[in-house]
Amino acid sequence: MPTILVVDDDPSVCRATARTLRLAGYATVTATRGEDAWKLLEHSGETIDAVVSDVVMPGLTGTQLAALVRARRPTIPVVLVSAYSFDEVRARGVQVPSIPLLVKPYDPAHLISLLGQLLDESQSEAG
């Protein structure tokens, strides 16, 4: 069962996303700060198979976290989520890399489908 790291500075959104993913058959680990998520990825014995992160967070943003993941653990898929549209995120000066961005509120089925696709692609590239 793949483990998904869910990162959102709103604890209720973080819990709801994790619950949705668990109901879809994924194991989850959560963090409410980008820095904590990065520590989990780097120093935890937990195997993380994918990351779902909010974009706009205090401290280490979701896009900064995504850049770190891509640089150090390039086989881990990342999905960014935001209450802001792609254009609004860019207008705030946040550089959105070529990573899927879902705008909140998104259809949970879309997130689950996207994660499945990304995990399948990740496994194909690793194997």
Image (cartoon, grey):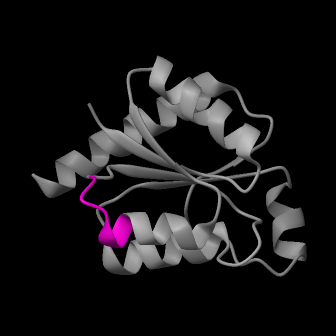
Say if residue 97 shows up in the picture: no
* Residue 81 x/y as whole percent: 68, 51
Q: Is residue 23 left or right of residue 14?
A: left
Say if residue 96 shows up in the picture: yes
Q: Quadrant of residue 108?
A: top right
Tell me where the magenta segment starts and ends, as one range. 41-46
Q: Is residue 54 left or right of residue 52?
A: right
* Residue 14 x/y as whole percent: 66, 42
* Residue at the extreme top: 23
The residue nearer to you, when weighing 97 against 12, is: 12
Q: Is residue 92 left or right of residue 18?
A: right
Q: Residue at x 33, y 52 (%)?
A: 48
* Residue 45 x/y as whole percent: 24, 59
Quarter of the N terminus within the rendering = top left
Is the residue 85 above or below the residue 60 in the image?
above
* Residue 114 x/y as whole percent: 50, 37
Is the residue 52 above or below the residue 25 in the image?
below
Q: Quadrant of residue 125?
A: bottom left
Q: Quadrant of residue 120?
A: top left
Q: Residue at x 77, y 49 (%)?
A: 10
Q: Residue at x 77, y 65 (%)?
A: 56
The residue nearer to you, when weighing 16 against 2, is: 16
* Residue at the extreme left: 127
Q: Residue at x 19, y 47 (%)?
A: 124
